[in-house]
Amino acid sequence: VSTQSTWATESYGSETTVTETLTERTELVAPSYIGIMGYGVDPDKDRAYPIPGFDTEIKHGVGFDLFYGYQGKSRFGFEIHGFSQIFETGDDLRTDYYRYGLGADVF
């Protein structure tokens, strides 16, 4: 945290007023960051994901996200992220489903 003092002088007739204004600025300790998240999907029988055209449902799934972000001194920044997911159908004769992707955000 850095503090900056600003002095202002105002005059009204024969009176002079001096005012001090303090401004605090918080510096980012680490302007860039990296992260990883993992998660699981376990729907109950009323919320299982039906697969159109097949008589099977997704039983459970797992996934993870990787991300990198940067925030500049002006508080604007960006984040890029990628994800991968695997959805298990629970049927050896059916294929499992794989999803993956990339994304970006500007803030």
Image: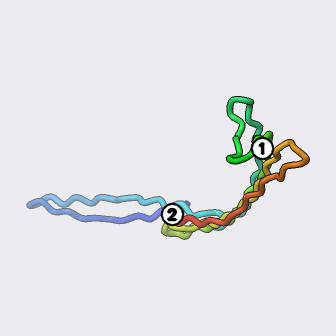
Q: Residue at x 53, y 69 (%)?
A: 73
Q: Is residue 36 visible?
A: no
Residue at point 16% right, 63% down? 11
33 or 3: which is nearer to us? 33
Q: Quadrant of the N terminus?
A: bottom right
Q: Read off the residue under disc 2.
A: 107
Observer-nearest of 13 and 72: 72
Q: Which residue is mark 1?
A: 40
User: Dot 1, crowdedness within 10 Å: few (<14), some or many (≥20)?
Assistant: few
Q: Where residue 19 sits in the image (x, y, percent)? A: 29, 58
Question: In the rendering, which numbered label is found on residue 63?
Answer: none
Q: Is residue 65 visible in this depiction of the protein?
A: yes
Q: Look at the numbered disc 1 and give the secondary structure of its residue.
A: strand
Query: Does label 1 or label 2 sit earlier along the sequence?
Result: 1
Up the image or down, 46 lies above or below 99; here it is above
Farthest residue toward the right? 92
Say whether residue 39 is left or right of residue 31. right
